[in-house]
């Protein structure tokens, strides 16, 4: 299994081809920049090794606590953490869920402290909808798809490196799909 430094190097080396491929596929510098930034973020901060004490995990610094339930629930290199199909999708859904819970709890505590009306879950859902509409309005309709594609390919580069390392050491690729 490659080291954290090797995974970082692979991420930075593959960021340039990701930018070029995206530019030629979309004919847009903005799309290429979005995918490249998301690729680097996906490889350095949002990759499969958030389920162990890794470089990716330590980069979250004082926000590491967000990943504690994720680390506690999944064993390392499971299909849910390192899987090509579900890995990144599950991390995005998990992260958005944790952020939603924190925002709702913060709103609830604020309402108690300031003695205002208690927030309802529908209020938070509406706030997410409004944020999505604002993002689509100013960044384009495909912004979220481009971000996810970049994050997925950045994390997939990590999984492919792990598969190659496992194959070299044991002669088998493991259950990453």
Image: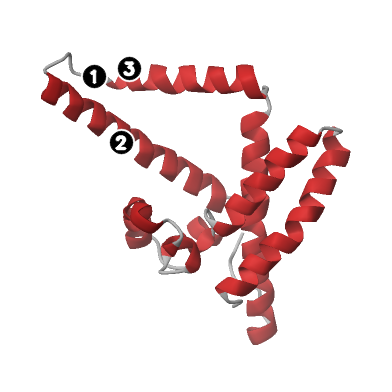
Q: Is residue 96 left or right of residue 142?
A: left
Mark 1 and 2 residues: CB-CB less than 8 Å, in contact? no
Q: In this view, does 41 lie to the left or right of 131?
A: right
Mark carried by residue 123: 3
Asked where in the image residue 109 lies, by quadrant, the reply is: top left
Distance between mark 3 and mark 1 Cα atoms = 6 Å
Lower sequence index among marks 2 and 3: 2
Q: How crowded is mark 2: few (under 14 residues within 10 Å), some or many (20 or more)?
A: some
Q: Can residue 84 be seen in this view?
A: no
Asked where in the image residue 111 lies, by quadrant, the reply is: top left
Judged from the image, the secondary structure of the residue bearing numbered disc 1 is: loop
Lower sequence index among marks 1 and 2: 2
Mark carried by residue 119: 1
Mark 3 and 1 residues: CB-CB less than 8 Å, in contact? yes
Q: Return the x and y of residue 143 as percentages of the image width and height.
A: 65, 30
Q: Residues within 10 Å of mark 3 (few under 14, many from 20)?
A: few
Q: In this view, does 143 lie above or below 48?
A: above
């Amino acid at each position: 299994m490659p080291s954290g430094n090797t995974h970082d190097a692979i991420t930075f080396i593959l960021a340039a081809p990701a930018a070029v491929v995206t530019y030629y596929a979309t004919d847009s510098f903005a799309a290429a920049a979005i995918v490249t930034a998301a690729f680097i973020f996906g490889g350095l901060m949002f990759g499969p090794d958030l389920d162990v004490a890794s470089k990716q995990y330590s980069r979250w610094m004082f926000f590491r606590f967000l990943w504690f339930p994720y680390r506690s629930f999944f064993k390392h290199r499971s299909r849910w953490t390192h899987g090509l199909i579900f890995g990144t999708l599950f991390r995005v859904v998990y992260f958005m869920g944790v952020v939603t819970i924190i925002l709702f709890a913060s709103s609830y505590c604020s309402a108690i402290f300031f003695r205002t009306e208690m927030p309802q879950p529908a209020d938070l859902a509406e706030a997410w909808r409004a944020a999505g509409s604002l993002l689509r309005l100013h960044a384009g309709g495909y912004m979220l798809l481009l971000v996810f594609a970049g994050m997925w390919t950045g994390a997939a580069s990590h999984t492919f490196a792990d598969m190659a390392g496992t194959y070299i050491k044991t002669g088998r690729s493991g259950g990453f799909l």
